[in-house]
Amino acid sequence: MDIILYNPLSRNGKSHAIVNDLVKKLEAEGHQTTVHSILEIPTVANFIQDVSKEDRVIVLGGDGTLHHLVNSIRGYDIEQPIYVLKAGTGNDFIRSIPSNEHLIKINDYINDLPKVTVNGQESLFLNGTGIGIDAYVCHLVNTSTKKKSASNYFKHALKAFLTYKPSTAEITIDGVTKIYKKVWFVLAANSVYMGGGMKFSPNSVRGDDLLEFMIIHRVPRFILFLIFPTIYFGKHVWFKRYVKIIQGKTMDVTYGKMSYLQKDGEAVSPVQSMHIER
């Protein structure tokens, strides 16, 4: 039996078509299937634990859906196999997994994830989390009434670059504290990709025992606007005068003003501090 869990809100409302295509493919291969909206399951962990260990749990959705999944099953002993469909361009989590399979088993990749604590709430994250202009862009995109697209993302990114004001930040990494001025954003990366295929952290290795902490600071607004497109190729790391990258296991950030935070692309506000732990 294949148990399909899907998010009806993902993929701009096109998830139903993807579910139907997957069901047809699996049933043509002789598999029995059942379909459930992950948003309608009261306790996802209990639901998965009740599934036979011979069955497959197949998750359809983007990084937000997987973020919801891993935090829903956190602390539970999950032995059932969990798979993710690699559909279209995939998402940032799938991009970071070296596999050519159509259905990718992810149990080994979600057992030991880093944590972020913000506003007194702790949660796991798959790809990355951060405070600043990148989170503000996520906020604008997620609250937009228009469908998510490259043009819509660019429009909101442009608005963020024109209006966002950087701030001083006190940042402690593995016990060493420094004050950084004119900080545009601070993030912790557990993977190469964030923001829909952007190589924010090209040297990250998913599954190792370190995070890459990135601080973008002291850069004039117009230069930041020029640097930003290079993130898609991971070339922003060349601008060492403005881009600080430090490997570590813990980070505490106190931002000089209320701002926005994103975790795996989901925006939270208002936020002024965060604690990261690997």
Image (cartoon, rainbow, N blue to C red):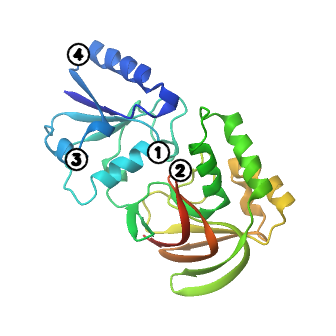
Q: Secondary structure at mark 1?
A: helix
Quarter that holds the N terminus: top left
Question: Residue at coordinates 33% horizontally, 14% vertically from top-left?
Answer: 24
At 74% from the left and 58% from the top, the residue drawn is: 236
Left or right: where 115 falls relative to 38: right
Considering only order in the chain, which callout, 2 or 1, is on the residue closer to the N terminus? Answer: 1
Tell me, yes or no, whether the two marked residues, 4 and 3, touch with CB atoms within 8 Å. Answer: no
The residue depicted at 42 percent of the width and 36 percent of the height is 61
Residue in the foreground of this view, choosing between 242 and 139? 139
- Quarter holding the C terminus is bottom left
Q: Is residue 189 left or right of residue 122?
A: right
The residue under label 3 is 43
Q: Are marks 4 and 2 in contact (CB under 8 Å)?
A: no
Give the Cα separation between the discs numbered 4 and 3.
Answer: 29 Å
Q: Earlier in the sequence, mark 4 or mark 2?
A: 4
Look at the numbered disc 2 and give the secondary structure of its residue: loop
- Amino acid type, mark 3: Thr
Q: Nearer the viewer, residue 228 or 98?
A: 228
Q: Could you say which disc has been placed on residue 15 in the image?
A: none
Amino acid type assigned to the residue bearing label 1 in the image? Asp
Q: Amino acid at mark 2?
A: Gly
271 and 82: which is toward the camera: 271
Q: Which residue is mark 1?
A: 63
Residue 276 position, x and y percent, is 47, 71
Label 1: how many Cα within 10 Å (few below 14, some 14–19, many 20+): many
The answer for how far apart the CA atoms under marks 4 and 1 are is 29 Å
Q: Which residue is mark 4?
A: 30
Nearer-N-terminus badge (4/3): 4
- Left or right of residue 174: residue 43: left
State the CA–CA distance, disc 1 to disc 2.
Answer: 7 Å
